[in-house]
Image: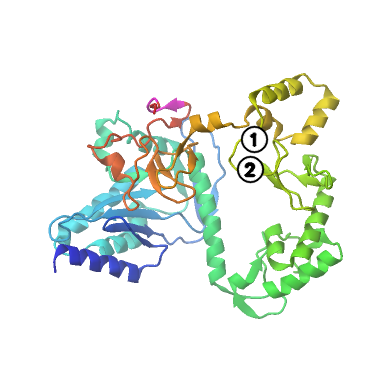
């Protein structure tokens, strides 16, 4: 067979062997993305250390699942007869030195008999079976910010000779801070636990029938499991009796509370509306940070949620902006002019206790600073965001490297030049000496108060 036929056959075989979580075939070039999920023995302790100042900023974390090692690859025209696949290894919790060890092992597999035959299955099997032992991945596993900063400095122009000898240019730790690693590990572990729960079979603690996890709910933190049918009836009876605070685990004297989203999924719309009303009313006594529905015929109290500019009235279902008190308008700027914002800032700064209380009641105590000082405008959006080259969605870069992922279409693009990046090998843009963004993956990223490079203008 010719190289093209062997490439097509290998991609078809990979799709047949691995599910969509493990292999994603590229749609724009021959290649794809393989994701290696390492099996962990419980419990696996991850220790976070800040070695710069010797302090500890994050709690250690017990996890059952870790984010995958990602092998992005594409085929040159003469693979497999002559050349190996072009590839890059990336991971959230392995640094570039550790990933470089794996890169060298993949090269060795090709050099020791891989030439002339397809290699991707062998590479995937090697990473799955040998990465843990090769890198000494055991509990407790330490992640420190010095290694993260060293990984970032590898992408900068002032790379020293020592780093060049130790680190492979195909290895990427796609994070910029210890905080980002902590967040990624916590989110992935939680989401994977939910996915695994839905696939397993459990015995309901009420009716004792065995059902799949996607037909059950689990209370936290007790982990008692019950089927949806039993809990639907249980929740409905409690809500009908007004016992909102009694939506706890039915097991003995267990006090684990049901989450609102669990209740919403198991009761009808009328029961959930009643539940929300009771829950809100019981919360108002101990939570002062509330806002009132701006509809004149409603005026119901609405509990503010941190980090969101939208609230929905539980009584009339009116979705409104907490800043301007008009119908929610998404990312469009509030109809405030600069003069109004300046006046609000001045009024709040000079107000007495009673007047401040009135303003805080209107805007919400936690949100007033945002309302006054950080309300965005069209000029702010234009200055601080860029359009996705695929779907034109406005993207704001808050943190991370210059390889961006669009929140709307999931397309990859370069923040610096807004070039569309390959789905299978997005980092090749920063690794190509002919590219204008060569070695600029972390340029302009603020690390511990310092920029690796000055930000460029567009």
Mark 1 = which residue?
A: 334
Please say whether residue 104 is visible from this viewpoint.
yes
Q: Left or right: 101 with respect to 95? A: left
Residue drawn at x 55%, y 37% is 57
Mark 2 in CB contact with mark 1 (< 8 angstroms): yes
107 versus 53 height, above or below: below
Report the residue at 38% width, 54% height from top: 69
Query: In this rendering, does residue 93 appear at all?
Result: no
The quadrant holding residue 110 is bottom left
Query: Is the residue marked by circle 2 packed among few (<14), some (14-19), or many (20+) residues within 10 Å?
Result: some
Q: Which element type, helix, strand or loop, lies under badge 1? A: loop
Location of residue 83 in the rendering, given as x and y in whole percent from the top left corner? 15, 55
Residue at (64%, 24%) from the top-left corner? 338
- Crowding at dot 1, Cα within 10 Å, few <14 / some 14-19 / many 20+, comes out as some
23 on left or right of 449 = left
Indicate which disc, 2 or 1, sits on the residue closer to the N terminus: 2
Residue span colored magenta: 450-454
| Residue to which mark 2 is pinned | 329
Instruction: Report if residue 451 lies within the magenta region.
Output: yes
């Amino acid at each position: 067979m010719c190289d093209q036929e062997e490439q097509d056959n290998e991609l078809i075989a990979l799709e047949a062997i691995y599910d969509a979580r493990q292999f994603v075939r590229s749609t724009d070039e021959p290649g794809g993305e393989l994701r290696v999920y390492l099996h962990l023995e419980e419990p696996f302790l991850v220790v976070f250390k800040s070695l710069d100042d010797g302090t500890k900023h994050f709690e250690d974390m017990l996890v059952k699942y870790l984010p995958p090692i990602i092998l992005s690859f594409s085929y040159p025209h003469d693979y497999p007869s002559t050349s190996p696949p072009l590839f890059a290894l990336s991971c959230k919790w392995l640094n570039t030195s550790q990933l470089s060890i794996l890169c060298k092992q993949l090269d060795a597999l090709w050099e020791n008999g891989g030439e002339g035959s397809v290699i991707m299955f062998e590479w995937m099997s090697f990473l799955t079976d040998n990465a843990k032992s090769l890198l000494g991945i055991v509990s407790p596993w330490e992640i420190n910010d010095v290694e993260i900063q060293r990984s970032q400095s590898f992408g900068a122009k002032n790379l020293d000779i020592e780093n060049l000898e130790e680190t492979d240019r195909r290895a990427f730790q796609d994070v910029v801070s210890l905080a980002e690693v902590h967040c990624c590990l916590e989110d992935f572990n939680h989401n994977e636990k939910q996915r695994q729960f839905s696939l397993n079979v459990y015995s309901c603690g009420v009716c004792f029938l065995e059902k799949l996890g996607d037909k059950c709910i689990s209370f936290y933190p007790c982990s008692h499991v019950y089927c949806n049918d039993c809990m639907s009836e249980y929740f409905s009876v409690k809500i009908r009796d007004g016992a909102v605070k009694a939506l706890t685990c039915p097991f003995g004297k267990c006090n684990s509370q049901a989450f609102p989203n669990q209740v919403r999924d198991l009761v009808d719309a009328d029961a959930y509306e009643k539940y929300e009303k009771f829950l809100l009313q019981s919360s108002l006594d101990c939570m002062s940070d509330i806002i009132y529905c701006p509809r004149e015929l409603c005026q119901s109290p609405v509990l503010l949620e941190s980090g969101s500019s939208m609230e929905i009235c539980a009584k009339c279902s009116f979705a409104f902006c907490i800043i301007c008190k008009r119908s929610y308008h998404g990312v469009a700027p509030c109809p405030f002019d600069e003069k109004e914002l300046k006046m609000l800032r001045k009024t709040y700064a000079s107000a007495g206790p009673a007047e401040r209380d009135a303003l805080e009641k209107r805007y919400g105590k936690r949100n007033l600073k945002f309302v006054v000082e950080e309300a965005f405008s069209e000029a702010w959006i234009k200055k601080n965001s860029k359009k996705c080259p695929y779907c034109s969605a406005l993207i704001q870069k808050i943190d991370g490297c210059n390889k961006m992922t669009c929140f709307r279409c999931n397309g990859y693009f370069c923040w610096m030049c807004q070039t569309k990046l390959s789905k299978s090998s997005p980092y090749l843009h920063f690794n190509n000496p002919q590219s204008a963004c060569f070695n600029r993956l972390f340029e302009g990223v603020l690390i511990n108060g310092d920029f690796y490079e000055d930000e460029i203008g567009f």
